[in-house]
Image (cartoon, rainbow, N blue to C red):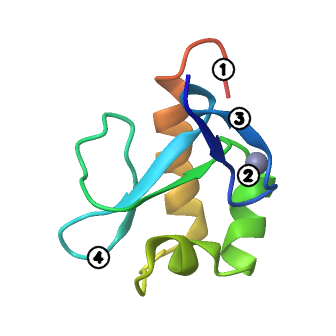
Amino acid sequence: MPERTCLGCRSVLPKSALVRLALDGEGRLRADSSGRLGGRGAYICPDKGCLAAALKKNAFQRALRSATHAGAPEALWEEIRGAAACISGRGR
Ligand SMILES: [Zn+2]
C-alpha cells in the first residue's frame, strides 16, 4: 500500500487512511474521494485538527503548487468528512 504524508500532522499513513484533496475545474479545493479529480493531490487525515493545521500553514498551496480557494474551512471539513465516510471503519 502506498503511503502518503498528512499535510496537517505530517504523519505518514497508508493512502487509504487519508483523504485526497485536489483542485476542481474552478481551482477550488475539494475532497476527492473517488479520485476523479486529476492533477496534483494533497492528502490529509479526516481530522479537523489536521485540516486547521494545514490551512494555517498554507500547506495546500505548497503541496498543490497553486493558489487555492480553500473557501470556508467548515465547508471543506464537511467534504473531508463525507469523503472519510467512504473510507472503511473510521466513522468520523
Ligand atoms: Zn493528520
Question: How far apart are the two marked residues, 2 and 3, measured between alpha carbons?
Answer: 17 Å
Q: Nearer the viewer, residue 62 or 83?
A: 62
Q: Which residue is mark 4?
A: 27
Q: Amino acid at mark 2?
A: Lys
Question: How far apart are the two marked residues, 4 and 2, measured between alpha carbons?
Answer: 22 Å
- Asked whether mark 3 and ligand 1 are closer than 8 Å, the reply comes as yes
- Asked whether mark 4 and ligand 1 are closer than 8 Å, the reply comes as no
**Among numbered discs 2 and 3, the one appearing first in the sequence:** 3
Which residue of the protein is positioned furthest toward the top in this rendering?
89
Kindly identify which numbered label has been placed on residue 13.
Answer: 3
Q: Residues within 10 Å of mark 1 (few under 14, many from 20)?
A: few
Give the number of the mark in front: 4 or 1. Answer: 4
Assign a secondary structure to mark 3.
Answer: strand
**Among numbered discs 3 and 4, the one appearing first in the sequence:** 3
**Among numbered discs 1 and 2, the one appearing first in the sequence:** 2
Q: Residues within 10 Å of mark 3 (few under 14, many from 20)?
A: some
Assign a secondary structure to mark 1.
Answer: loop
Residue 66, position as x, y percentages in the image: 40, 83
Residue 15, position as x, y percentages in the image: 56, 33
Question: How far apart are the two marked residues, 3 and 1, measured between alpha carbons?
Answer: 17 Å
Q: Amino acid at mark 1?
A: Gly
Question: How far apart are the two marked residues, 1 and 2, measured between alpha carbons?
Answer: 14 Å
**Among numbered discs 3 and 1, the one appearing first in the sequence:** 3
Give the number of the mark in front: 2 or 3. Answer: 3
Quarter of the image with the C terminus is top right
Q: Amino acid at mark 3?
A: Leu
Q: Which residue is mark 1?
A: 91
Assign a secondary structure to mark 2.
Answer: helix
**Among numbered discs 4 and 2, the one appearing first in the sequence:** 4
Name above or below for residue 12 compared with residue 25: above
Residue 91, position as x, y percentages in the image: 66, 20
